[in-house]
Image (cartoon, rainbow, N blue to C red):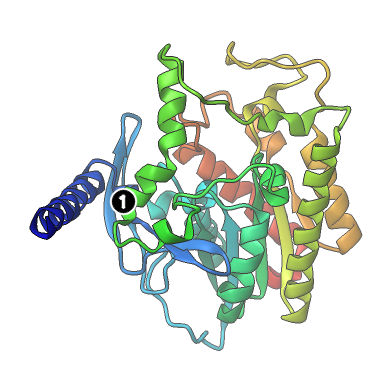
Amino acid sequence: MFINFLLVLISTFVFLIVFDFCLRIIYPLSDLYLPHEAYDYGLKPNKKINFSKKEFATTIKINRLGLRDEEFALEKESNCRRIVVLGDSFVFGHGVNLEDTFVKQLERGLNQITDKKIQVINGGINGYDTKREFFYLREKLIHLQPEMIIIAFTLNDPFSNSGEYHFSPLPENPLLRKMPFHALGFFWQYSQNIKKSLKKAGFKVDYQSFNHLKIFEQAEDQKTKEAWQATFVYLEKIKELADENNAQLVIFNVPTARELYCPDSFAFDKEIVCEENHNYNKVTDNLSSFAAKERALFISLINKFRQETGPLYYPEDGHWNKKAHSLAAEVIQQGLVEKNSLFQ
């Protein structure tokens, strides 16, 4: 009996090893993350993967500090000014190579117009929200001694900040998080996405998607109010941390297609649905009001993005393409130079 049990245990372990290995090959992003007690999860140091989809092919390299960035020394040079950029997959650069991210394009642009050495550090991690960005900044990035902190705000942030919505590439169960099979844990967590795909294909599965567009509704329900309250709490914490470390805070919003083309009715994409009871300026208005109250800088990308007639988002994947990253870098650089003494 014991031998049979041992054989089953060994067979199961071997199966998990093989399955985990196959998952890493099929979907390399599944082996990119490590759990962390303070900020939920981070990126595996010294990791390099090739990640391709139908719309793009990219190489992702994580440096020794666990950042999708070039290798650099912890200690700053005397003439160096550091900027850290926090956000989710749009900052991380999902769908483009590192040199094409707005973070690195901003770095190159700033270094062309100032005699100071400007280092713009990519602190983006897929799936992050304002809450995790605060803890990530407090526990890790603030020790890089930045003179400026840039926060990229996205649509999923408010409900994620309040806990109404939760995303993580790793299992929430503490025991599963400790498994050595990180790709398998990623697959387990993404079972909801698999259910979503099956439901779209017509299968009867128990899946209900979360509607982040509720954040635009003019008449806010209690959960939406709580989402914004939580968001402002963590933005205030970030501002306090920035002030304590003599760093300037900059905020910009990653606009959705609806924010660009509703309610002005010149959407080039017929699939964009503009709801009459939605205020698509709400995110911009709330963030700009917060920035004015807290003496932070808010930069809007909307006007520049609206002027672009070509696509800025991958149609299927939904993330920025190279052109969008270039536009974002251009607008942010212009805003920093016009309104900030760091580069004057």
Q: Residue 125, position in %: x, y? A: 50, 55
Q: Residue at x 72, y 81 (%)?
A: 245
- Give the residue at x 72% y 45%: 158
Task: Pick whichever, 258 or 341, lies toward us.
Answer: 258
Q: Of the residues shown, which amino acid type is indicated by label 1?
A: Ala
Location of the C terminus by quadrant is bottom right
Query: Dot 1, crowdedness within 10 Å: few (<14), some or many (≥20)?
Result: many
Total labels: the figure holds 1
In the foreground, 296 or 343: 296
Q: Which residue is mark 1?
A: 183
SS at badge 1: helix
Residue visible at 64% across and 52% down in the picture: 152
Seen in the image, is 89 located left or right of residue 85? left
Residue nearer the viewer, 293 or 226: 226
Compared to residue 219, the image places residue 232 above or below, namely below
Measured as percent of width and height from the top left, residue 203 is found at: 41, 14
Q: Is the residue 258 above or below the residue 86 in the image?
A: above
Q: In the figure, residue 32 lies in which quadrant? A: bottom left
Question: In this orientation, does residue 68 appear?
Answer: no
Snapshot quadrant of residue 87: bottom right
Which x, y percent locates residue 28?
Answer: 29, 48
| Residue depicted at x 11% and y 55% | 1
Q: Residue furthest front?
A: 1
Q: Is residue 187 above or below residue 86?
A: above
